[in-house]
Image (cartoon, grey):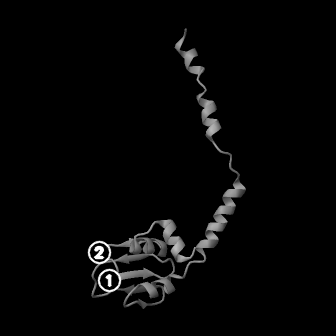
Amino acid sequence: MDINQNKSSYPVQMVVRASQKPTSNHTKKLSRFEFNKKLNSLPTPLDYYAKELKRFYPKKTQATALCPFHRDRNPSFSVNLKTGAYLCFACGGCGKSIISFHMKKYRLTKQEALKSLGA
């Protein structure tokens, strides 16, 4: 009995193919569309951060405020009002969107944060 013959008799390829689920491109595009539609229902960065931050000073595209992640007496927290990205120059807290800010401030998962923001 040859070892190579014995290895080829195992139905490994059949198991891998059977476990794969067929997906169509149409369902993927539909779910992405629905997800983007829900993200568009989020508040604007200006509205959101104005409610969440103390001593909030908006300008054209940037705003400064007191950092909610550490004790802050002078505004060291900077927010991009177009993207929602934030950065604290004192403690180093940073993120790319209001979703990541909401997750960090309230210690939520991404799904919980999206749900509480109304998406």
Name the residue rendered at 61%, 33% in the picture.
15
How far separated are the C-alphas under marks 1 and 2? 9 Å
Residues 113 and 76: in front is: 113
Disc 1 + disc 2, Cβ < 8 Å: yes
Tell whether 19 sits left or right of 114. Answer: right
Q: Is residue 111 above or below residue 65?
A: above
The residue pinned by badge 2 equals 91
The outermost residue toward the top is 1
Residues 96 and 38: in front is: 38
User: Residue 37, how many percent across, how many down?
Assistant: 64, 72
User: Residue 33, how many percent across, how many down?
Assistant: 66, 66
Name the residue rendered at 38%, 72% in the picture.
94
Tell whether 18 sits left or right of 102. Answer: right
User: Residue 74, how many percent across, how many down?
Assistant: 29, 88
Q: Please tell me in which quadrant of the rendered image residue 51 appears.
A: bottom left
The residue pinned by badge 1 equals 76
Q: Quadrant of the C terminus?
A: bottom right
Name the residue rendered at 45%, 84% in the picture.
49
Tell whether 48 sits left or right of 27. Answer: left
Q: Amino acid at mark 2?
A: Cys
